[in-house]
Image: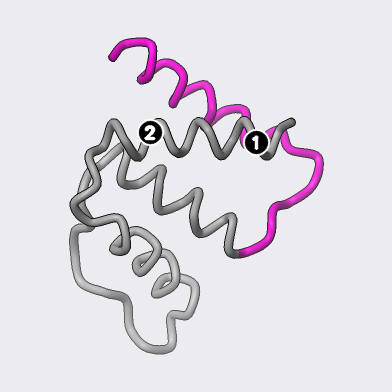
Amino acid sequence: MADLKSAFEQASRDIQTLSERPDNDTLLRLYGLYKQGSEGDVKGDKPGFFDFVGTAKYEAWAKLKGTAPEDAQKKYVDLVKKLIA
């Protein structure tokens, strides 16, 4: 468990060192997995209709509702490793 937590934290630092910005779908996937892994199920109200970025982020996180934080952390670490490779 401690190994996964440290790998998750390291992946969140590593993702900031990418030479190329991932596409928007990948960024949203990363965001959703990170939030689910660090905070659990989505909280709060969905942003307003004209907040396109906020709505997209909220929906990416909401899709993972019910996913165990540990599973989300593992998927996040795996995705970051794939992007860095």
Read off the magenta span: 1-24
Coordinates of residue 34 in the picture (x, y in percent): 41, 43
- Between residues 16 and 78, which one lies in front from this camera angle? 78
Which disc is residue 73 wearing?
Answer: 2
Q: Main secondary structure of the magenta part?
A: helix
- Measured along the vertical axis of the image, is residue 69 above or below residue 21? above
In the picture of the structure, the residue carrying the numbered disc 1 is 82
Q: Residue at x 32, y 63 (%)?
A: 63
Secondary structure type for disc 2: helix
Task: Name the quadrant containing residue 40.
Answer: top left
Indicate whether 36 appears above or below 61. above
Residue 72 belongs to the span the image colors magenta: no
Quick check: 26 left or right of 33? right
Residue drawn at x 32%, y 76% as measured from the top left: 47
Q: Residues within 10 Å of mark 2 (few under 14, many from 20)?
A: many
Q: Position of residue 70 (x, y in %)?
A: 28, 31
Circles 1 and 2 in contact, beta carbons < 8 Å = no
Amino acid tagged 1: Lys
